[in-house]
Amino acid sequence: MGLITLVFVAISLAMDAFTIAIAKGISLKEAKPHQAAKVALFFGGFQALMPFIGWACGQSFEKYIHAFTPWIALILLCAIGGKMLYESFQDDEDEFEEGNPLSTKSLMILAIATSIDALAVGVTFAFLNVNILWAITLIGGITFVISYAGVVLGNKVGKYLKNYAEIVGGIILIIIGLSIFLQNTILG
């Protein structure tokens, strides 16, 4: 998996976090830099941790299913992308909670929930022999930046952008899944 593809994977994975960061920004009266950084650290940290865990698990059984790697990448990435597309058309009024929108408990739960997709992508990384340290650094860093921007943007104009981010992220993941499949089967 090349650098450009990896960057697109990172951006796509960050779209769930971006969506929630926008919601957090909307819920704040005024988004201060330390508040945006707190959200970004939670989301970026978990987006980096989960693919590592998935990669570690995938390493243990990669040798048994190596022949099916293109199919696994296709299924996982298309399923994650499809889920993102589906969720983008759902009514998410429950995302805007009352109380402290930046509580550690709330951010922890949301960071884990938005990074489950990254766990599955990490399994795919094991099958594709991706440099995991480079991948998680990119994913965590890109998610941090995008989440920080999401809080700031959400505080300004978030109600108009939320669903579009998930749609774009879902489409990109599906395209990457198809690309990996085609490169390793029909075109490979």
Image: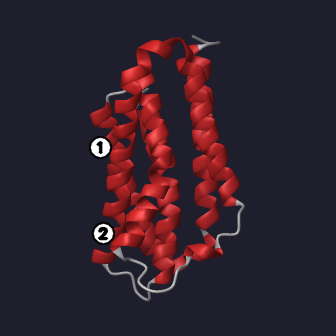
Question: Marks 1 and 2, how far apart in space?
Answer: 17 Å
Foreground of the two, 83 or 32:
83
**Residue at coordinates 45% horizontally, 51% vertically from top-left?**
115
The reply to whether residue 129 is in sight is no
Q: Which mark is residue 55?
A: none
Spot occupied by residue 10 in the image (x, y as percentages of width and height): 44, 44
Residue at 34 percent across and 31 percent down: it is 56
- Tell me: residue 6, above or below residue 182: below
Q: How is the image coloured?
A: secondary structure
Rendering coords of residue 151 (x, y %): 43, 72
For the N terminus, the quadrant is top left
Left or right of 24, for residue 137: left
* Label 1 element class: helix
> What is the count of numbered marks?
2
- Residue, far bottom: 29
**What amino acid is labelled 2 in the image?**
Ala
Quadrant position of residue 112: bottom left
Closest to the observer, 174 or 94:
94
Vertical side of 159 occupied by 83: above or below = above
Q: Which mark is residue 37?
A: 2
Vertical arrangement, residue 184 with respect to residue 147, above or below:
above
Name the residue tied to disc 1.
137
Question: How many other residues sit within 10 Å of disc 2, few (<14), some (14-19) or many (≥20)?
Answer: some
Q: Residue 82's spot in the image, x, y percent?
A: 67, 45
**146 sits to left or right of 161:** left
Q: Amino acid at mark 1?
A: Thr
Whole-percent x and y of residue 176?
A: 57, 33
- The earlier-in-sequence mark between 1 and 2 is 2
Residue shown at the point (39%, 50%) measured from the top left: 47
Local crowd at mark 1 within 10 Å, few (<14), some, or many (≥20)? some
